[in-house]
Image (cartoon, rainbow, N blue to C red):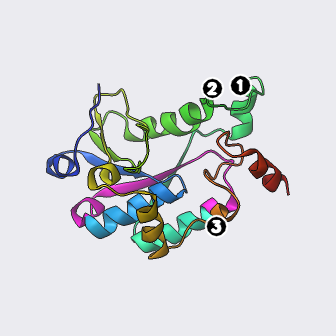
Amino acid sequence: MSSTITVQEAIALEDCRHVVGISGGKDSGALAIYIRDNYPEIHEKVEYFFTDTGAELQEVYDFLDQLEAYLGKEIKRLSSERDFEHWLKIHNDYLPSPRQRWCTRMMKIKPFENFVGDDKVVTYIGIRADENREGYVSQKENIHAVFPFVEDGLVRSDIFKILEDSVGIPAYYEWRSRSGCYFCFFQQKIEWVWLYE
């Protein structure tokens, strides 16, 4: 089973890949910037990646372009090689929900695990110190998770400051509370209306 390790333990590991998944949202974007600015020894070797569901808002792609320029490194684009409509049909037109998160499993986790393969990998995850959730921790033995914001005590206001001082906040936060996927079940009911408009 994979483990959670500290930033310093991750830095000390040899013969492993370091990866940061960028969702197009505030926390993962801020994490990439935080690593660049505070852990240059990680930034030097890290691979940034984005897993595209094919159902992202244009603002997500705009933010990725800004972030890529700021980081000075490529953000690799991954996909499940099928778009959202394909997976929706496979799931009998059943939209993803908190109880059936097939979108995360099929369109995010599987492409990520294919990307890292059997390589020894450290994945840095942008969960904040003020969040009460674990996030993705792989069951694969070759993948170790690191939570720099939790370890360093960064909270929501810190994340917004990191973004405001660098690339800015993703534009969709002007009308959405989270996630750049248009079908996201986490969005509020009024956000479905705003999306329609």
- For the record, the magenta segment spans 39-60
Name the mark on residue 45: none
- Residue 46: in magenta span: yes
From this viewpoint, is residue 74 visible? no
Residue at left offset 33%, top offset 66%: 36
Type of the residue with mark 1: Ile
Q: CA distance from mark 2 to mark 3?
A: 28 Å
Residue 42 on image: x %, y %: 25, 59
N-term mark: 2 or 1: 1
Q: Secondary structure at mark 1?
A: helix
For badge 3, the amino acid type reads: Ala
| Crowding near the residue tagged with mark 3, few <14, some 14–19, many ≥20 C-alpha atoms within 10 Å | some
Q: Which of the image's four quarters has the C terminus?
A: bottom right
State left or right for residue 55 relative to residue 48: right
Instruction: Report the residue marked by disc 1.
Output: 90
| Quadrant of res 117 | top left
Residue 190 sits inside the magenta stretch: no
Mark with earlier residue (3, 1): 1
Q: Is 36 drawn above or below residue 24 in the view shown?
A: below
Residue 100, numbered label: 2
SS of the residue at dot 2? loop
